Image (tube, coloured by chain):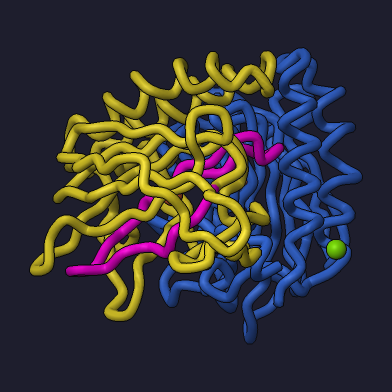
Chain colours: A blue, B yellow
Amino acid sequence: MSNFSSIRHLIRGMTDAVAGDTHDEPRLMERARPLLADLISSDDWLPDEFAQPHPEHYQQYLLYCDPHERFSVVSFVWGPGQRTPIHDHTVWGLIGMLRGAEVCEGFELAGEGSPPRATGTVRLEAGGIEAVSPRIGDIHRVSNAFDDRASISIHVYGANIGGVRRHVFDPLTGAAKEFISGYASPNMPNFWDRSRA
Amino acid sequence: MSNFSSIRHLIRGMTDAVAGDTHDEPRLMERARPLLADLISSDDWLPDEFAQPHPEHYQQYLLYCDPHERFSVVSFVWGPGQRTPIHDHTVWGLIGMLRGAEVCEGFELAGEGSPPRATGTVRLEAGGIEAVSPRIGDIHRVSNAFDDRASISIHVYGANIGGVRRHVFDPLTGAAKEFISGYASPNMPNFWDRSRA
Ligand SMILES: [Fe+3]
Ligand SMILES: [Fe+3]
Ligand SMILES: [Mg+2]
């Protein structure tokens, strides 16, 4: 029996939050933070199928998407030593560390032809939360802090993140390239079977 | 590439409908009917994993659950010759035939110790829709119309149907027994990956 009450609580809370003013980013992030903190305070609920690393690259599994795509919840699974390119999000996001640890390097663009400028590095341990958004700093590169095991973070975004048109940046030239991430699985977990959890 | 736009459209439409008056059953059923009719007008979207019969008994797969559990959408998959017991729902439901055909026998209770009384039988062909609710008749027994192949209907209910405490009835004595159906799979389809569909 897994414990799905925290993820259901987060989903309901964010559903109610976006029913008000969807564009009040600080308010939505403030609502999301304690819900995410509660969710990652225990590591007994994420079904194994949505915690599987891929040998070649990180995996992003959709856990929930709002019907109007005003927010989504994903599990981000790192194999040993894996990292993202430098990328942006274009919407607000909270990153909560569930298992293991990750290193987030912040960047800002330094103009045409120049490498993005590093703005600081944070190491996120289980239970910790980081934030991104165009307002507070939206460009980063994230790595599994471990070379010998998987790490998993749970992200809440202010959109259906797998469908957002956003960018990766060349670390040498800063050149932007568009991408849409999609999701690693055609399935999502069923958090609503009350005969199971 | 499957086409998930009709199921997304139904989910969004019902989400908006329940945000008003959740208890106005006739209005909700009226909103759901054309959305369900559109959904079952083509049979190119239900992922195979949620269309699998079980050798022993019918399967109920959750396709979507409203965060506040005010409505749900399920696929109901019949193996050859399978049928339900006589049962009720306690909430409104619409049954839309996607593939194959099913036979719905209506019943009403006839008092303690007496067999439930048959109120009429309907054969539902692909594209057809039936309704149940405590208001319009809530007790039925449903069978696959075929002995040699699977049939599939898509249901919309006014609750998280897999979690509802309801009843099966003895066909000889009418005696009621409580049950909670649950769901056949720990997963749901991901209808929100716009890089796929
Ligand atoms: Fe990121
Ligand atoms: Fe039924
Ligand atoms: Mg908990």
Point 77% across, 27% down: residue: A16
Q: Position of residue B158 (x, y in %)?
A: 58, 35
Q: Quadrant of the C terminus of chain A?
A: bottom right
Q: Is residue A92 magenta?
A: no
Left or right, B159 with reference to B9:
right
The residue closer to the viewer here, B167 or A79, is: B167
> Is residue B48 visible in the rendered structure shown here?
yes
Q: Which residues are magenta?
A: B64-88
The residue closer to the viewer here, B194 or B52, is: B52
Q: Is residue B68 magenta?
A: yes
Q: Position of residue A72 (x, y in %)?
A: 61, 39
Q: Position of residue A174 (x, y in %)?
A: 52, 35
Residue A67: image quadrant is top right
The answer to whether A69 is drawn above or below residue B84 in the figure is above
Point 80% across, 53% down: residue: A121
Residue B76: image quadrant is bottom left
Point 58% across, 75% down: residue: A48
Q: Position of residue B38 (x, y in %)?
A: 27, 24
